Image: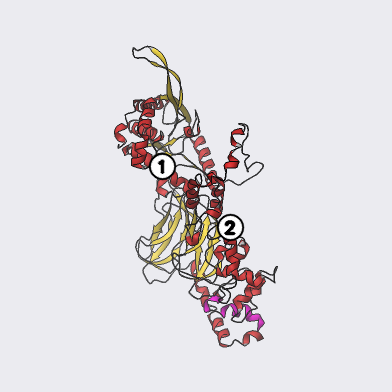
Amino acid sequence: MSNDVTLPALGESVTEGTVTRWLKNIGDTVEVDEPLLEVSTDKVDTEIPSPVAGTLLEILVNEDEEAEVGAVLARIGEAGEAPSGGSAPAAESAPAEPTPAQAEPAATPAAEAAAPAQQEQAAPAEPSAPAASGGAGQDVVLPALGESVTEGTVTRWLKSVGEEVEVDEPLLEVSTDKVDTEIPSPFAGTLTEILVNEDEEAEVGAVLARIGEAGAAPAAQSAPAEQSAPATPSAPAQESAPAQASAPASAPAAASAPAIQPASVASAPAVASAPAPTPAPAAPPAPQPQTEAPAASQGEGSGYVTPIVRKLAKERGVDLASVTGTGVGGRIRKEDVLAAAEKAPAAPAAAPAAASAPAPKASANEVEVSELRGQTVKMTRIRKITADKMMESLHGMAQLTSVVEVDCTKIWALRAKNKAAFSEKHGVNLTFLPFFTRAVAIALQEHAFLNASVDGDSIVYHPSVNLSLAVDTEKGLMLPTLRDADSKTIVEHAQGIVDLAGKARSGGLKSDEISGGTFSVTNTGSGGTLFDTPIVPSPQVGILATCAIVKKPVVVKGPDGEDVISVRPMCYLPLSYDHRIVDGADAARFLQTVKRIIEAGEFESELGL
């Protein structure tokens, strides 16, 4: 009797998910809680474990297809029970057909010359038995690399066709709008086929390559007709020639270069990504100097620098030739560029002396012209998501903004007095933002109507305060979550803000660090903004902006109760809220509570000094 595997609930308000990858094939035996498939939703990317032990009999939702929560994804029967069929087993049974053909050419190699019509099947099979199946081993697919990531660009293959790979050994590098990472091999064996070349895009779940059994020969990829001619053990060396017919004189040397050091040929991606090159044992000594030369001239460690790292180096003014990579094979990572940028001011002090001279003469009207002028570019994934969410939120609720002005004299003095000791003891700078987030978290305990969300005709009042903090990144706006902010001190707020902002900018946020927010805070004042009307991110019902703190003359009470003019650090706090469940009076009371806490400035006991 079979058991249904259904899509479980994967988070608040999640109603559906997309199957990104099946980890088991039909006919495979699975254990209880063994990972069965991967699912991506708009909030989380996760593995679904098998609820029962047995044999995977049927897959009902294929990769890249959507399913609602509770939908049946697959069926599992008793161990040993024959599979009920599906699309996967057909491909798995394919290797059985060429078996006689594989044995025949091996036994009668002379027959190949007399039967050219059969060479297309016989020639690939000669080096190894699995070759006749076209390297139809196991598929390597592009895994889910983060919330809302649907595609990625292959920036570099770390293995060539014909090379042996181990489980979890780095196989290729992929760049997305959120992460720049290595993809490990899910299987051990021989890389028989590369389906997505370098600098090409692929969707999550797409097949990137195929890995066959150890010793399997490469599969015919781009020119099977040309590969059918070789029928001798020297076939791999001859196969590389047709692929580079445009330069026959240099083809042998160029073709063998990727087979030796594909990672270092940054200047010739077309050659490095060609499927034809297979390991040629006799070739390694000759091409070594050729492949090392480009890497040495570029000074980029492993020879390939991903677009994200190259762009970051350009923005930070870092010369990649002077950076030593700490990644696999000496590859330069973002962390290496950032570290070099921090050291840069001291090192080039003498060099830019001449260049720094004209700086004082620069006019205030002189600006750096953007490289985007006159261009039409595609939205990044994060920008598209932000656009859709903002429009959905703006048109899905009745939004209103109320504002108060706060005297920051107390927290200004407290910060000035303790910031050096705070930084030395806790390892982070004491900015003004933790004071505001702490005050908001305290106030939300009293004003629960703003720490809520709308669910149909009901209002959900959340049991804890999870603050979504707006972070400006190179890829766009992100909202990581400071969880249980109401139970954290100023120190924990400061450390949490720095940690989450760093992860957001480096692409290191986990799914639970970017979901579950109950109220938002955006620090627009960090850019000098005096006033703001932020949009509430659905399904939350409130967002507070902390605007710039500016010293200005205000009327205050003197020692005898008289009105006097005093220069004070003042700040506007605009609160946008969902008027469907939050009234103006409610918003005003919340803002007055935050104002009272900030102006009292009673945070010294939480500084841990």
Helix, strand or loop at mark 2: helix
Choose top left, top right, bottom left or bottom right for residue 229: bottom right
Give amino acid for label 1: Val
Is residue 419 in sight in this rendering? yes
Measured as percent of width and height from the top left, residue 159 is found at: 52, 66
Q: Is residue 43 above or below residue 489?
A: below
User: Magenta segment, principal secondary structure?
Assistant: helix
Q: Which residue is mark 2?
A: 298
Measured as percent of width and height from the top left, residue 430 is found at: 38, 36
Q: Which residues are magenta?
A: 115-131
Q: Which mark is residue 558?
A: none
Residue at mark 1 to residue at mark 2: CA–CA distance: 34 Å
Q: Which residue is mark 1?
A: 498
Measured as percent of width and height from the top left, residue 354 is found at: 60, 41
Give amino acid for label 2: Gln
Quadrant for the C terminus, please. Answer: top left
Left or right of 584 on screen, residue 244: right
Quadrant for the N terminus, please. Answer: bottom left
Choose top left, top right, bottom left or bottom right for residue 192: bottom right
Residue 220 vs residue 58, the one in the foreground: 220
